[in-house]
Image: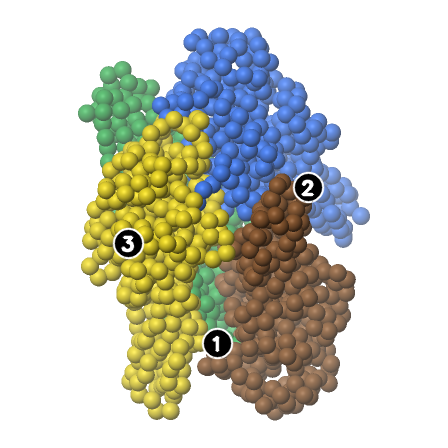
Chain colours: A green, B brown, C yellow, D blue
Amino acid sequence: MIVLTQSFFMNLAAQERHELKVPDIEGYKTLKCDFHIHTVFSDGLVWPSVRVGEAYLEGLDAIAITDHIEYRPHKKDIDAKLGRSFEIAEQATKEADVLVIRGSEITRSMPPGHFNAIFLANNDSLDKKDWRDAFKAAKAQNAFIFWNHPGWASQQPDSTKWWPEHTELYNAGCMNGIEVANGKEYYPEALQWALDKKLTMLGNSDIHVPINNEYDFAKGEHRTMTFVFAKERSIEGIRDALLNRRTVVYAGNKIIGERKYLKALFENAIEVTNVVKSGKNIKITFKNKSDLTFELLKTEHNPDVVYFRDYTIKPNTTETVTVKLENGTKEGNVNFEITNLVVEPNHGLSYTYKVMAK
Amino acid sequence: MIVLTQSFFMNLAAQERHELKVPDIEGYKTLKCDFHIHTVFSDGLVWPSVRVGEAYLEGLDAIAITDHIEYRPHKKDIDAKLGRSFEIAEQATKEADVLVIRGSEITRSMPPGHFNAIFLANNDSLDKKDWRDAFKAAKAQNAFIFWNHPGWASQQPDSTKWWPEHTELYNAGCMNGIEVANGKEYYPEALQWALDKKLTMLGNSDIHVPINNEYDFAKGEHRTMTFVFAKERSIEGIRDALLNRRTVVYAGNKIIGERKYLKALFENAIEVTNVVKSGKNIKITFKNKSDLTFELLKTEHNPDVVYFRDYTIKPNTTETVTVKLENGTKEGNVNFEITNLVVEPNHGLSYTYKVMAK
Amino acid sequence: MIVLTQSFFMNLAAQERHELKVPDIEGYKTLKCDFHIHTVFSDGLVWPSVRVGEAYLEGLDAIAITDHIEYRPHKKDIDAKLGRSFEIAEQATKEADVLVIRGSEITRSMPPGHFNAIFLANNDSLDKKDWRDAFKAAKAQNAFIFWNHPGWASQQPDSTKWWPEHTELYNAGCMNGIEVANGKEYYPEALQWALDKKLTMLGNSDIHVPINNEYDFAKGEHRTMTFVFAKERSIEGIRDALLNRRTVVYAGNKIIGERKYLKALFENAIEVTNVVKSGKNIKITFKNKSDLTFELLKTEHNPDVVYFRDYTIKPNTTETVTVKLENGTKEGNVNFEITNLVVEPNHGLSYTYKVMAK
Amino acid sequence: MIVLTQSFFMNLAAQERHELKVPDIEGYKTLKCDFHIHTVFSDGLVWPSVRVGEAYLEGLDAIAITDHIEYRPHKKDIDAKLGRSFEIAEQATKEADVLVIRGSEITRSMPPGHFNAIFLANNDSLDKKDWRDAFKAAKAQNAFIFWNHPGWASQQPDSTKWWPEHTELYNAGCMNGIEVANGKEYYPEALQWALDKKLTMLGNSDIHVPINNEYDFAKGEHRTMTFVFAKERSIEGIRDALLNRRTVVYAGNKIIGERKYLKALFENAIEVTNVVKSGKNIKITFKNKSDLTFELLKTEHNPDVVYFRDYTIKPNTTETVTVKLENGTKEGNVNFEITNLVVEPNHGLSYTYKVMAK
């Protein structure tokens, strides 16, 4: 049959969209974004419109198309100017409500390695011999620039190192953010650097193949992505949020980011729907209104406040937990760490829920 | 990250191959083939190597790359000669054991509509203004030529018609086969024509998008394909089988084809592993060693032979059926139709299993 | 560990409920019900509370517990009065919002075969030697009585027959309804009888094993059930609906019932969200807001109104269909049959959608 | 319909068995076993035959039925002697090839908590008022006795403690093994005790509900189980292996046990199928022939031997890894920890693979 370019969306139409449920937080909409994506125009393996369709079906709000500048192995067959993949993807948004951001991947050996520049107006000015010139050109466009996969084994074989060149870029305002997770990899060193140096945290798929070949959605997997807390659902809203470091990273079952955002996500995801007190028992029923999982581990606490040792709250469930106040205790604190809400390397978010006897 | 062209197969390596279990039949290997496939080089949406990877993961033996000659909407960006997609796909077979056949889709308005020519040596000679010349050029190369999706609504809006031009092509030896199924569509008229005119029956995916966007493998779906009964697993073996009409079509849960092949498939898929007779009861235990489903419906029979009214044999299961011989009957026939083994429009394969009392 | 009886619901809590989306229709709530269910108290294999948990997780509103009166193979170990399984199931509803109806299965050889009596106040009075007395006792309680699996091969080996005893029961007001589908079986004869004799149509699971052993929910399967159009979500509301034949049957991808109800379901499931006219083309975008599938097949029509030949509308999708008005036609009818909305044996619902040029 | 007790297996027959692929090791068959299972005869929620069917479908070799002695909440309705559930389950093995072991759960408050005694000849003698008498009775029967869920929060609210009573039992030969994992919980303290005190390590499901309500097989989950290295596939073979501590525990993606067994499993699961050397590059292709996952993490190594930082080997895949020998190195060691092969708390199996240049 003949299939028009836009026809990817005919198929799209016939597929069920997965609305990824992540709560908004006070004052901001939570947008689901992937800022690192390839197509056949560099070394990816799908046409740019496919990326829009995939994002739509997975419930994403925005993607950046970031084909390599310096690495285009299909060049013999595909003769197009830089940024052409963005144009095709943007056309496709007529049929699927996804925001598409123009980007490029500056692709250099280490140091400084690979960086994405997004919110570009034009891609060509970044095509320079010297990498310093490429960064200058990106900065001249007010691009948002971030370090990709800082712990990629091909460039950092034994450990994730910060090189002098990164200090140089950072000081020059050419490093606004850093990938704390890329695809199935998570870089704890990058998390620490983001905290220390006030870099925006990003998590992206860096997808090259058709997305279904890397993530098994039937098993509940999701692509690595960034939750962006934006004042509005627009490209401008995303840029503002990135510049102000209002992001957290969603990779596997981990959500990685600043304490205040993770706390807000948790509190907006979980609603206590009922508390029943009888004698020393307090039965707390709550609902997880989100598609997120939370893994709780008991921390230091008054031994007369008796409760679970560890507890997993699955997505979209209603559960009941019993707390006992022993030896005449009248009130107490249920203290726990949410181990998969990562606030620094190897540390989950600490949380306290107060209980009181009748 | 940088991903080399062959890297699709790095991902491939990390995915589990589904070995599609279909029995061989007497004297022939059963090869699973898809002879109608598109890439970005015409109006498909993936790079050719992806098609090899998909086929490998689904357990196929062979595919034909059949980009349109006359319809290339990506031409502005992809400037390559006809057949380039085949070359790239063939390169990819170094890393995945799939046979790739060079083909082209002759893409004309109705009549005569769309046809595939496969086993080409060169694609360029088919690029002619007049469709008759394109067919002549294909025949001159000894191509195997078949009519695609004869009931496609865009060209045959109300019914599936055979036009005088098809008679012309058929008489000129330019129609060796016909698609009895294309994607999720099945054309009963085409089945009847194949039987009457001795055309090779084909079932193909005609895939344009990434295959996972059209088939939900987690739900047990499979792409539409052709089972080819070949003397050897080679391109030459396939060509010989196609020319001698040794094929059946596997589309949804239907297997469509000539009686003798469907009977052989059934008998090689099902093994009776145990028969226990006690009094008038005969308990027959059998194993379905294949990934195929068989749907049985009782047909005319001696009322003293009592058995199921309908019965579904699921893939890879061991089941037991009880037959009763009433009123002193000593032997009898269990007669049924296998409704999803389609031997002509609306008719499944008739089958008889003889039973005898102790 | 020690698990309290109610603990099934601790596990329940940790599982995601599937909210089965079926639209309400004018004046009625659509309740999803299963009126034929077994437990260990007859020949089922699970404790009664499990049935409540399963129903809850699958999004059902109501179930009837209908253990056999005359067939209790676990009697040696389970020594309980009739109706005890209902009591245990009802207890379980404290932790899962499912309505549970008291029933019994009158279990006799053919004729008259098996019948369910539901909305009983007491089960014991149905335990009679003579089957006529059992029916009388059920009727004396104002039970709703229906014929189960009328085409069950064990009792009707070759065809689905209506026996004189059924006429007797029917005339005596002891047959209010009939199972048109039971488990994976559908009985076209029963559909015809229901239409002719004004019997309430029912579809039930007749489940004996754990429900996951019979239905593969990961593959999108659902148990056979009855959609009940009730004035309120209560046992009384269900009884009123059953007595007034406000039901349709949901079995596999078929929805079986009276024309008016199937039409209302279709019209409330599908919302036309956009119509774009340009020249002779009319592009109609619509949304299937339900978990139901609809299979459309073109029927007789003006050949100048050009549209699809067949078309499947999948659950929860937004799709666009193009209709062309050729040869200056200004308006026309898009006529089709919805083949899986079965209004009589082998006939789907006929439907017409009017279109007009700009 | 009427379903005979054995009919669970009619349904069973129609379901595909999952053959769990775990390699045998030198001299032993690897049997997949679950030694802790409940039915309606204590506080479980399914009939005993269901447990045999579930085990069969999941590819298990053996199960123990271990209903509680002291806790039987269904006693009002189910009036049967202890061990009756074992008898029913054993009957069911006529239709499904699973070994069933007679057991009981001694169910006491802490200390000493809950213990299973398996390979019993009779269950009644364990029904004693004083827990010490129950253990004596089990030992008198030569039962294999193990401590269940030693870290169960209900009995050990804040930490997993070894009580003096456990020393007493251990010294008296009344503690042969210990659950290192129970259901979804893993107890690192128990692993350490097993290593120090030469206790047999066990991992069991302790399943009460239908198994599908606790494990999502469609997502690749499996029940917690014990791999038993037996000289033969028989109850006697299992008893011999348990007494000689030839077991490892399979819980989630962890395999927990003694170094020698985990090493043997790894080496029998992974086959190196090809090694290609070119210049300083060594490409190693290997096949994971099992259903197990292995998670590799680089450990201390010669920096001139360059390879992955971490690497996940998925089940049933063929993968290629490249090792580079830099700076003229001629041979070296690829050192890594297999983090999910747990040999002591927080330590995976260390492994070295030697490579040599051409």
Element type where label 2 sits in the image = strand
Element type where label 3 sits in the image = helix
**Seen in the image, is C290 located left or right of residue D93?**
left
**Quarter of the figure with residue D159:** top left
| Residue C241: percent from left, percent from top | 24, 53
Q: Residues within 10 Å of mark 3 (few under 14, many from 20)?
A: few
The label shown at residue C171 is: 3
What's the chain of the residue with tag 1? A
**Seen in the image, is A163 located left or right of residue A283?**
right
| Residue A196: percent from left, percent from top | 41, 42
**Callout 2, which amino acid?**
Ile
Element type where label 1 sits in the image = loop
**Which of the two residues, A151 or D131, is positioned nearer the viewer here?**
D131
Q: Which residue is mark 2?
A: D270
User: What whole-number distance in Å separates the C-alpha atoms at marks 2 and 1?
Assistant: 46 Å
| Residue D280: percent from left, percent from top | 74, 50
Do marks 2 and 1 both belong to one polypeptide chain?
A: no
The label shown at residue A4 is: 1
**Which of the two residues, B114 or B51, is positioned nearer the viewer here?**
B114
What's the chain of the residue with tag 3? C
User: What whole-number distance in Å separates the C-alpha atoms at marks 2 and 3?
Assistant: 72 Å
Q: Are marks 3 and 1 in contact (CB under 8 Å)?
A: no
Is residue D127 among the parts visible in the rendering? yes
Q: Are marks 2 and 3 in contact (CB under 8 Å)?
A: no
Do marks 2 and 3 both belong to one polypeptide chain?
A: no
**Callout 3, which amino acid?**
Asn
| Residue C49: percent from left, percent from top | 35, 35
Query: Relative to A87, is B265 above or below?
Result: above
